Structures are given as C-alpha cells and as structure tokens.
Image (tube, rainbow, N blue to C red):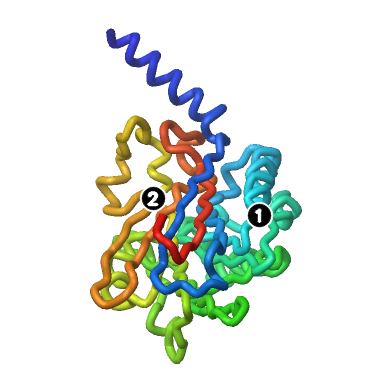
C-alpha cells in the first residue's frame, strides 16, 4: 500500500511538472455592478498575476498563454505583481512575447513582493536599486502602465473608470509593506466603476474592505493556490487556506447603502518553488462587467 500511494504521489508530481504546469485555464467571471453605466456594460478585463519569469524553461508556453489572452479580446489587461522570482536578470528573452499582449484601453501593472529584490543578498544598496530600475525600464519598454501607489482614470464614452494600484502590502509580517493606500487616493475622485490592484489578498481583508468600500473590485494574486489542491466535483481545497482566508476565486462583501464589494484572487500564471501544479492550474481570469443580474 505504501509503495502504491508513493507511486501515485510521484506520478502526480511528475505530471504536474510536465503537463499541468502549462495547462492554462481561463476562469470566466461575470460581475453584476448596480447602476453601472451603459458605457461600461460588457467591459472585459483580463487579469494575469505571478508570472515568475525565472521559473519558465522556455518562451514557448508563455507565448501560448499570450495567444490565449489575446483570443479573449480584452478591453483592459491588468497584471497584479511578481514578474520575477529574485532579480530582474530573469526578464531576459521574454520581452518580445509579453509585448504581444493587446488591449485597446491599456495594460496596467503593479509590483509584487518578489519584484523588489528583497530575497537577494546584494553587495550594496545601489546594486539593489539598479535591479529595480531594470524592472521598471522593462515595464516602460512593454508599454504597460505601472501603478506605484498611484491611479489612472479612463473616460469611456462619458463613464469614468478609475484604476488604482498600490505597492506590495501584506497583513503577514514576513512580507514587507511598501503600499500606501491613503497616499494613493489622496485628492483622487472615485469614478463610475473603481478598480484596485493590490498583490496580496490579505490587504483587502485588513484595510480595503474596512476603509475603502468605494472600490467595487479588488484584484490580487500572490497565493498561487499553493500550486496544489483540489478544485473538482464541488470541492475547493488547498493548503493555501491555512495561510490565506481568501486564497483563490471570488469573494463578495455586501455593502449596506452601496454596491457590493468584490475581491478576486488569481491563482497565478507561473510557478515558484515546486516547478509544477497539481489540481490548481495556472490561471487567466476574464472578468466581464454587467449592469444586469444574470
């Protein structure tokens, strides 16, 4: 029995690192937004998160993911952090592929905890700063708008879409806090639909859902769903649940006197640590806004 169970586990891990690790799954999420202007009805937002370029063995599977995203014809693409594992040297060879992502209203991004170079012993602080600068230049070359405790607003046929992005903020002490939502929203007027990008979902529980309820939708990543779990036959379980209250998928918070607030946690496109996925597939999220309940 021990040999059988061990063999089964080994087979699962082997398949997870050769097939499932690049078996990209599109999660379709339809969000009802009360009093959403007609101009924003049907707006399509694609979320990507946790690409972790340092873990990709070649550019080919990333190109497959990019093609899959473009086939969805998103209006906006957002990336919720962790482009690299440890250093910006990992971006080499992937620029042309990521530059092929297309969205007519723009591509927005934030930084994740792995992007700052905090997990490398740098010789000098200047060397660490240069590492981050290389990543910032990478975003500039891609044409993605990086939000660092800042906002942008889009006028879509007379309707205002506000997009806010904060730097990494976590309620877990071992993850550094760079985010400042108060600074981000200082003198900023909310729009007809308000979107927040924050890498770590513990931020939503600790601060956003309490003090910033004007954000209709918060998008996070970070957890990867631990790259291991079960999502089948009505069962949703992962070891991630023991660290994160919200570790994957959609959470709804009723808001008395206002719209409901949504949090969506993306399971990540890439991987780190274990070079595979078992039960928790790499995710591309397609979120469609609607002013009618389905």
Query: What kind of element bears circle 1?
Result: loop
Who's the residue at 42% across and 72% down the image?
178
Where is the N terminus found, in terms of image quarters? top left
Answer few, some or many: residues within 10 Å of disc 1's Cα (few below 14, many 20 plus, some between 14 and 19): some
Q: 3 or 282, which lies in front?
A: 282
Residue 7 is left or right of residue 153, and the answer is: left
Residue 60 is left or right of residue 210, and the answer is: right
| Residue 249 numbered tag | 2
Name the image quarter holding residue 8: top left
Which comes before the other along the chain, label 1 or label 2?
1
Residue 166, visible in the rendered structure = no
Answer few, some or many: residues within 10 Å of disc 2's Cα (few below 14, many 20 plus, some between 14 and 19): some
Who's the residue at 60% across and 64% down the image?
76
Name the image quarter holding residue 278: top left
Residue that sits furthest to the right in the current view: 96
In the image, residue 107 above or below residue 182: above
Identify residue for label 1: 73
Residue 119 spot, x, y in % from top left: 46, 56
Query: What kind of element bears circle 2?
Result: strand
Q: How far separated are the C-alphas under marks 1 and 2?
A: 21 Å
Residue 197 spot, x, y in % from top left: 47, 67
Who's the residue at 57% across and 36% down the image?
22
Residue 70 spot, x, y in % from top left: 67, 51
Q: 244 or 274, which lies in front?
A: 244
Residue 112 spot, x, y in % from top left: 48, 61
In the image, residue 288 above or below residue 157: above
Residue that sits furthest to the bottom in the current view: 187
In the image, residue 91 above or below residue 64: below
Who's the residue at 55% across and 34% down the image?
23
Residue 224, visible in the rendered structure = yes
Q: 132 or 150, which lies in front?
A: 150
């Amino acid at each position: 029995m021990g040999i059988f169970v061990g063999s089964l586990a080994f087979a699962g891990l082997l398949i997870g690192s050769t097939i499932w690790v690049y078996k990209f799954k599109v999660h379709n999420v339809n969000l009802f937004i009360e009093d959403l202007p007609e101009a924003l009805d049907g707006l399509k937002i694609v979320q990507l998160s946790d690409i972790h370029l340092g873990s990709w063995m070649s550019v080919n599977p990333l190109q497959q993911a990019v093609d899959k995203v473009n086939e969805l014809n998103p209006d906006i693409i957002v990336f919720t952090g962790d482009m690299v594992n440890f250093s910006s040297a990992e971006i080499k060879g992937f620029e042309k592929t990521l530059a092929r992502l297309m969205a007519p209203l723009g591509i927005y991004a934030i930084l994740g905890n792995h992007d700052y170079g905090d997990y490398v012993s740098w010789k000098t602080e200047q060397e660490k700063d240069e590492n981050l600068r290389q990543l910032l230049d990478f975003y500039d070359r891609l044409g993605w708008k990086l939000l660092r405790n800042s906002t942008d607003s889009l006028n879509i046929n007379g309707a205002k879409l506000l997009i806010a992005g904060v730097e990494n903020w976590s309620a877990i002490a071992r993850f550094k806090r760079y985010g400042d939502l108060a600074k981000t929203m200082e003198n900023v007027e909310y729009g007809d639909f308000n979107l927040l990008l924050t890498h770590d979902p513990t931020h939503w529980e600790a601060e956003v859902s309490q003090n910033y309820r004007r954000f209709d939708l918060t998008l996070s990543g970070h957890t990867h769903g631990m790259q291991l779990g079960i999502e089948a036959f009505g069962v949703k379980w992962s070891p991630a649940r023991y660290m994160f209250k919200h570790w994957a998928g959609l959470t709804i918070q009723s808001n008395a006197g206002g719209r409901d607030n949504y949090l969506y946690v993306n399971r990540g496109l890439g991987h780190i640590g274990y070079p595979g996925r078992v039960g928790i597939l790499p995710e591309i999220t397609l979120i469609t806004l609607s002013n009618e309940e389905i």
